[in-house]
Image: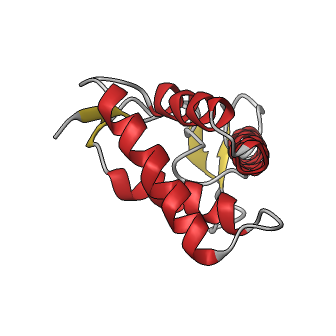
Amino acid sequence: MFTIIKRDGKEQEFDTKRIFNAIYKAAQSTDGVADNEAHSIATLVTDKVTQKVKDGDSVDAIQDMVEKTLMASKYKGVASKYIEYRHDRDKARKAKTHEMFLSIVNAEANEVTTRKCKHVRRDSRRNDDEVCIRNHSTFCR
């Protein structure tokens, strides 16, 4: 079997079931495609794509192969559903990445994100807090 490159750069063994399932779901969501026909389409396209995959191909390259194979077939409706699903997943992936970025940028001060100032001393008037003797703030960054 082949090794493919995931979006995060990690290697993973090529799994034809993932292609089959994606095509099968696209076919099932297409009007006028019966369940047994959806299975046949998924099997046919998976077999064709599997013959083209090379060791070290990326997930995106494999998805492009699936799209092209579907578009070259008589199953344009299934291709459309597959492309639509892929687009929606890309948007969701980008939104999640953006959300993670914002959570890092807007992180509240905690032991990991805050470095204590080198000028800190214990405030004798307040036993529970440390204060920067250079009047920076409770914790300097």
**In the image, residue 72 lies at what x, y percent?**
63, 29
| Quadrant where the C terminus is found in the figure | top right
Name the residue at 69% across, 41% down.
Answer: 74
Which residue is farthest right? 31
Q: Is residue 127 above or below residue 75?
A: below
Q: Residue at x 54, y 55 (%)?
A: 41
Q: Position of residue 65 (x, y in %)?
A: 52, 29
Is 92 above or below relative to 94?
Answer: below
Quadrant housing the N terminus: top left
Rendering colour mode: secondary structure
Q: Nearer the viewer, residue 104 or 18?
A: 18
Quadrant in the picture for residue 12: top left
Give the residue displayed 69% in from the left and 48% down from the top: 82
**Residue at the outermost left position:** 1
Position of residue 137 measured from the top left corner of the image (x, y, whole percent): 77, 39
In percent of width and height, residue 46 lies at 42, 47
Describe residue 14's horizontal placement relative to residue 62 as left or right.
left
Report the side of 31 relative to 122 (left or right). right
For image coordinates 72% across by 67% down, the residue present is: 33
